[in-house]
Image (cartoon, helix red, strand yellow):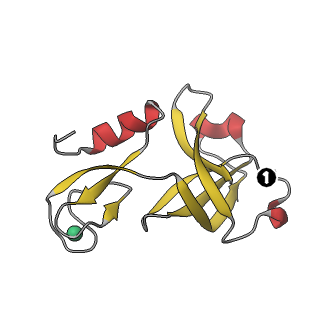
């Protein structure tokens, strides 16, 4: 894949359960969520990269009062996950009980998964590894 990465395609990969991030061709930094320029060196020479799907939990919150479109899915976890490759993404946390947030540990290893929401839209998710 040599085409220039776009945010539209980033979303499309998630819908296809085939998560990709941007990689800076200049400094090698992994970039997700996507921006037009590298976070680290400001270069706009970006390409697609696959990630291992392994990461760890940095922070999380339980959503009890969700936006209208996610109302029926609440409560659910949203977490910030640091990928092995160094970039951080916001994603649903799966396989954990939102009524027992005290059981969730920061730093716990997670692996990439996906979840289909009630609208049929696919979300990036992570579950305990
Ligand atoms: Zn860079």
Counting every numbered tag in the picture gives 1
Q: Residue at x 66, y 62 (%)?
A: 109
129 relative position to 45: left or right: right
- 88 is higher (above) or lower (below) than 13: below
> Which quadrant is home to the N terminus?
top left
> Which quadrant is home to the C terminus?
bottom right
Q: Which residue is mark 1?
A: 98
- 27 is higher (above) or lower (below) than 74: below
Q: Residue at x 77, y 51 (%)?
A: 96
Residue furthest to the front: 52
Front residue of 51 and 14:
51
Secondary structure at badge 1 equals: loop
Q: Residue at x 62, y 68 (%)?
A: 59
Q: Position of residue 116 (x, y in %)?
A: 59, 31
Front residue of 122 and 68:
122
Q: Quadrant of residue 79?
A: bottom right
Ligand 1 location (quadrant): bottom left
| CB at disc 1 and ligand 1 closer than 8 Å | no
Q: Position of residue 110 (x, y in %)?
A: 64, 57
- 65 is higher (above) or lower (below) than 23: above
Q: Quadrant of residue 10?
A: top left
Q: Residue at x 79, y 52 (%)?
A: 98
């Amino acid at each position: 894949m040599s085409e220039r990465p776009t945010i539209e395609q980033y979303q499309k990969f998630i819908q296809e359960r085939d998560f990709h991030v941007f990689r800076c061709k200049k400094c090698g930094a992994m970039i997700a969520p996507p921006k037009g320029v590298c976070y680290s060196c400001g270069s706009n020479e970006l390409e697609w990269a696959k990630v291992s799907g392994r990461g760890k939990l940095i922070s999380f919150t339980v959503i009890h009062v969700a936006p209208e479109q996610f109302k029926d899915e609440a409560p659910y976890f949203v977490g910030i996950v640091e990928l092995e490759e160094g970039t951080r993404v916001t994603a649903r946390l799966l396989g954990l009980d939102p009524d027992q947030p005290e059981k969730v540990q920061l730093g716990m290893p997670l692996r990439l998964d996906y979840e289909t929401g009630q609208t049929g839209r696919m979300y990036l998710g992570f579950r305990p590894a």
